Image: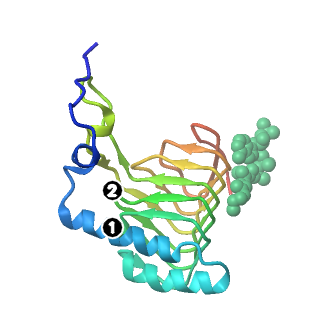
Amino acid sequence: MKEIKLKKKDGFVSFLKEKIGHIKIREIIFSEVEGWLIWLFGSFPGVIGFSLRTMVYKLLFKKLKGFAWIQPRVTFIQTNRLKIGRFFAVNSGTYINAIGGITIGDYVLIGSNVTISSGMHPIDGQGVPVISRPSKPMPIKIEDDVWIGAGVVIMPGITLKKGTVVGANAVVTKDTEEYAVVVGAPAKKIRIR
Ligand SMILES: CC(C)(COP(=O)(O)OP(=O)(O)OC[C@H]1O[C@@H](n2cnc3c(N)ncnc32)[C@H](O)[C@@H]1OP(=O)(O)O)[C@@H](O)C(=O)NCCC(=O)NCCS
């Protein structure tokens, strides 16, 4: 087993270098602006909240068509790579990280506490800690008329085909078939709608 060599310095600057040293400066600035805007507008209640978020996120996201029903406290990361279609709704506690690109179609409904992250840290090999390895971009596609139940994890690189329903708490590790209902971890098809 290889030893992990601990760096001598572990203050703020050393940590930043270790964690985000490989990221371009304009990406870091974008993330900073994005973080503040989502913090400012992400928790407003009621219809005013939905309306404010739709207006602000249309400017921020790569694409956001139409009015979006984004409940308070949904986390979005790297939204310059996030495209969302019309009639989109998402519930509180969901985490969407578009580092590798995420494309969401029309009429998509996402439940609460769902994780959709489109990047993965390489894990093979020893000696270099996983946290220090840049995330590999793995695009995710969610086609039209998909419903993702509460607590689901969609793995990086996955396509949820048109009409897919993902049952609560599933972990989706493979692309789905059109109109499939999938449940469990790893998610398996139980029927076609
Ligand atoms: C996936 C889902 C839509 C399936 O509904 P359905 O087609 O009516 O399925 P059924 O209730 O008839 O169940 C069929 C089988 O799948 C199992 N099953 C259903 N949902 C499951 C789930 N989330 N995880 C694991 N197994 C599940 C049932 O136990 C049943 O198994 P059995 O045949 O061995 O008895 C529904 O169960 C679900 O998870 N909905 C999401 C709810 C949710 O998250 N709401 C809030 C977000 S907006």
Q: Amino acid at mark 2?
A: Gly
**Pointer 1 local density, CA inside 10 Å: few below 14, some 14–19, many at least 20:** few
Which residue is identified by label 2? 100
Q: Residue at x 61, y 70 (%)?
A: 72
Q: Tell me: 79 left or right of 72.
A: left
Q: Along the polypeptide, which appears first: circle 1 or circle 2?
A: 1
Q: Which mark is residue 45?
A: none
- Figure label count: 2
Q: Is there a contact, CB below 8 Å, between mark 1 and mark 2?
A: no
Which residue is identified by label 1? 32
Q: Position of residue 175 (x, y in %)?
A: 48, 48
Q: Secondary structure at mark 2?
A: loop
Q: Tell me: 55 left or right of 180.
A: left
Asked whether mark 1 lies closer than 8 Å to ligand 1, one says no
Q: Residue at x 65, y 85 (%)?
A: 47
Q: Is residue 131 in view from this perspective?
A: yes
Q: Residue at x 29, y 31 (%)?
A: 129
- Tell me the CA gap for discs 1 and 2: 18 Å
Q: Amino acid at mark 1?
A: Glu
User: Please, is residue 177 above or below residue 6 in the view?
Assistant: below
Q: Position of residue 44 (x, y in %)?
A: 60, 78
